[in-house]
Image (cartoon, helix red, strand yellow):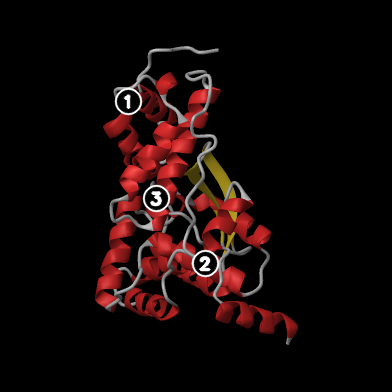
């Protein structure tokens, strides 16, 4: 049933963004704002039900003339498809004009993760800061788990089991907040023990006592002091985590589960690409 036949595209985008507040993270909300912006800029005055697949294709070709990265173009289509699928589900439109949109091909490589040598540099620098116990434990935990920034920032003491080397993190994603179990190594467990002893009892139950922005800035400072010129942000640790698991021959289904992806296709799209040299190395590990 159509609830509003005269709703403009701008009104639809506004309604969609409002409906997502509280169910997705602020960073994901900003992601939608950015990737839905061309719809508002070029089609915002149009009635939603007048939008056709051809309109969206023409808009895509228009923005494609800009010097944009393949992942950016991919995400434009991804965002538009999400918006109009929501609009159809909520009864704002009778037909979904984005249903037949095809996502542009991605380059045959996965997103860049932090390099092993850069990780070692940051770990060495973390051990020499004014709060070495916290900083070392934090870097190791993120590297070992592939946890999202919000998940590590909100990790509480009661959800950390150092003896079993696992933790329950709560991360915001599509569909709202989700819990998942993450695992870490003995080295990280030792670092966490040292930090928890130093941390002591506090009213603040967050393990690392930092907000997402604080963690990001800490990574930035450590990377700068370490002389890291490549990727260093927390999400690059997540990329490296996925690639390391796949490189060790772990099945993509298991990796998808460990990453907390809602669908294995997400893991395949972003991490399931290997060079011939990488494939040879994986093959040799299994067959030799």
Task: Determine whether 229 is above or below 36 in the image.
Answer: below
Q: Which mark is residue 73?
A: 3
Near mark 2 (Cα within 10 A), the count class, few <14, some 14-19 or many ≥20, is many
Residue 280 located left or right of residue 54: right
Residue 28 badge:
none
**Disc 2 secondary structure class:** helix
Q: Earlier in the sequence, mark 1 or mark 2?
A: 1
Is disc 1 in contact with disc 2, using a CB cutoff of under 8 Å? no
The kind of secondary structure element at disc 3 is: helix
* Residue ID for mark 2: 241
Give the secondary structure at mark 1. helix
Q: Which residue is mark 1?
A: 10
Rendered location of residue 160, percent (x, y): 54, 56
Q: Tag 1: Cα neighbours inside 10 Å, few (<14), some, or many (≥20)?
A: many
Contact, CB < 8 Å: mark 2 with mark 3? no
The residue positioned 54% from the left and 75% from the top of the image is: 275
Q: From where the camera sits, is residue 24 visible?
A: no
């Amino acid at each position: 049933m159509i609830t509003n036949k005269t709703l403009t595209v701008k009104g639809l985008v506004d309604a969609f963004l409002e409906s997502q507040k509280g169910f997705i993270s602020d960073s994901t909300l900003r992601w939608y704002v950015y990737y839905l912006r061309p719809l508002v800029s070029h089609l915002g005055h149009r009635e939603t039900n007048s939008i056709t697949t051809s309109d969206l294709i023409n808009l895509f070709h228009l923005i494609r003339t800009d010097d944009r990265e393949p992942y950016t173009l991919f995400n434009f289509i991804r965002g538009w498809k999400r918006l109009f699928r929501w609009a159809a589900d909520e009864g704002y439109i009778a037909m979904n004009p984005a249903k037949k949109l095809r996502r542009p091909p991605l380059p045959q490589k996965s997103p860049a993760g932090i390099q092993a040598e850069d990780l070692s540099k940051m770990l060495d620098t973390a051990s020499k800061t004014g709060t070495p116990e916290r900083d070392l434990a934090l870097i190791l935990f993120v590297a070992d788990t592939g946890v999202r920034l919000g998940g590590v920032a909100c990790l509480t003491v009661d959800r950390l089991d150092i003896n079993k080397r696992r933790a329950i993190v709560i991360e915001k994603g599509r569909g709202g907040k989700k819990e998942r179990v993450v695992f870490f190594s003995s080295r990280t467990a030792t670092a966490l023990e040292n930090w928890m002893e130093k941390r002591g009892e506090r009213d603040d139950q967050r393990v690392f006592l930092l907000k997402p922005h604080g963690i990001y800035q800490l990574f930035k400072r450590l990377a700068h002091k370490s002389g890291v010129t490549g990727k260093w942000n927390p999400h690059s640790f997540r990329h490296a985590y996925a690639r390391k698991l796949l490189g060790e021959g772990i099945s993509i289904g298991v990796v998808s589960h460990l990453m907390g992806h809602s669908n294995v296709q997400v893991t395949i799209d972003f991490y399931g690409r290997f060079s011939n040299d990488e494939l040879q190395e994986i093959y040799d590990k299994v067959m030799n």
